[in-house]
Amino acid sequence: MVVRVKIKILCRDKPVETIGLLNSGYESETPQVLIPVELAKMIGLWPDLENAEETEFETAGGPLKVWIIPRACRVTVLTEDTHSPEVEGDIVISPIADEVLISDKMISELSIVLEDVGRGLWRFRWEPTEKLRRSYPPKYWR
């Protein structure tokens, strides 16, 4: 199992609620959210890549061409009883991803603690250790 959380991404004044996969192996210098092209189209970032920098990420499957738009979004984790702080971050557009990925720096800025990844359990940093939250099912953008 992995940990997925419900998030709101605000980009270009267009809020989108979706599910994001917390990926501690997605190391970044800044808080980043990697989104599929289908989601980028929905929020008006594709194919208009103004202010985007084309680059390559090294992945376990080999090099991946992506487009990074610095400080293009604000992200909040949503739960039934509270929410995280809103965090400014970079949007990374991937032509092969089919779900939203949240980088290690974004996970930290959102105050998320991964408690038991194998069971899909997490909590916010300010919550007591016994306040465990469950992972959401995946949301695919195809």
Image: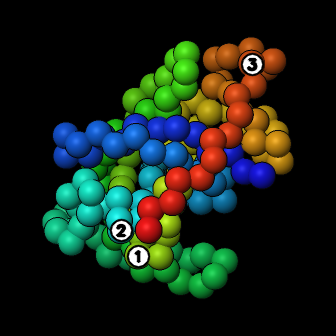
What residue lies at 68% left-to-right and 45% top-to-bottom? Answer: 3
In three-dimensional space, the C-alpha distance between marks 2 and 1, rounded to whole angstroms, equals 6 Å
* Image marks 2 and 1: residues in contact by CB distance under 8 Å: yes
Q: Is residue 124 above or below residue 7?
A: above
Asked where in the image residue 126 lies, by quadrant, the reply is top right
In three-dimensional space, the C-alpha distance between marks 2 and 3, rounded to whole angstroms, equals 35 Å
Q: Which residue is mark 1?
A: 95
Amino acid on which the number 2 mark rests in the picture: Val
Amino acid on which the number 3 mark rests in the picture: Lys
Say what secondary structure mark 3 lies in.
Answer: loop
> Is the residue marked by circle 3 packed among few (<14), some (14-19), or many (20+) residues within 10 Å?
few
Q: Which residue is mark 3?
A: 131
Task: First in sequence, mark 2 or 1: give its number.
Answer: 2
Q: Residue furthest bottom?
A: 62
What residue lies at 78% left-to-right and 45% top-to-bottom? Answer: 117
Image colouring: rainbow
Give the left or right position of residue 13, taking residue 54 as reference.
Answer: left
The numbered dot on residue 37 is 2
